[in-house]
Amino acid sequence: MELEPELLLQEARENVEAAQSYRRELGQRLQGLQAARRQIKESASQTRDVLKQHFNDLKGTLGKLLDERLVTLLQEVDTIEQETIKPLDDCQKLIEHGVNTAEDLVQEGEIAILGGVGEQNEKLWSFTKKASHIQLDRWMTTSQPKITDSSSVNVLQIILRMYM
């Protein structure tokens, strides 16, 4: 059965109109997809910028906090160092005083001995009396700090382990 040319023409026109309508609808969907893609890209770009700024702010804040913590820890180490060295300094002063006293005593004794017995007897007597009053052996028994047993050294090691 053959369609009449008019009906055939009419059907063809309707099909063309339907195809045009379909093409317009698909074109609008493509534009919608492109707009959505643009929005997603813009949103992602803004999110990246916000994240970068946020992390830069965090880095700055964290850097300041770390710098402050470092200063505090260095001050603690300095304090421990000073507290640990002070007894050594005190001991050194005592020893140096003992060395000076011993030097003076040696010089005085050598002068007294050179004078011999007789007219220099007074110098020998004075030296011997002075030497007996000075306890020479106490310099040998001056307690000496053991650095390896020092709790301050242990504290420094603990601080280092905490931050390494």
Image: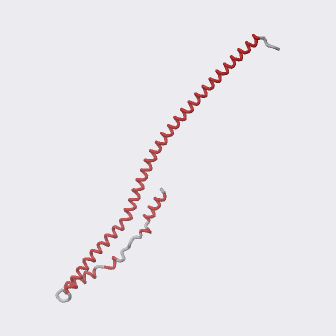
The x, y position of residue 72, in whole percent, is 41, 54
Q: Is residue 33 left or right of residue 12?
A: left
Q: Quadrant of the N terminus?
A: top right
Q: Which residue is painted at 58% across and 31% down in the image?
A: 37
The image's colouring method is secondary structure
The x, y position of residue 137, in whole percent, is 33, 79
The x, y position of residue 43, in whole percent, is 54, 33
Who is closer to the viewer here, 157 or 48?
A: 48
Q: Quadrant of residue 42?
A: top right
Who is closer to the viewer here, 117 or 46?
A: 46
Instruction: Say if 75 sits above or below 42 in the image.
Output: below
Instruction: Say if 158 sits above or below 62 in the image.
Output: below
Q: Quadrant of residue 105?
A: bottom left
Who is closer to the viewer here, 111 or 27?
A: 27
| Farthest-out residue, left | 119
Number of marks drawn: 0
Q: Is residue 110 left or right of residue 44?
A: left
Q: Which residue is painted at 16% across and 87% down in the image?
A: 119
Q: Which residue is painted at 81% across and 13% down in the image?
A: 2
| Farthest-out residue, right | 1
| Farthest-out residue, bottom | 118
Q: Which residue is painted at 43% across and 52% down in the image?
A: 69
Q: Is residue 10 left or right of residue 144?
A: right
The x, y position of residue 159, in whole percent, is 46, 59
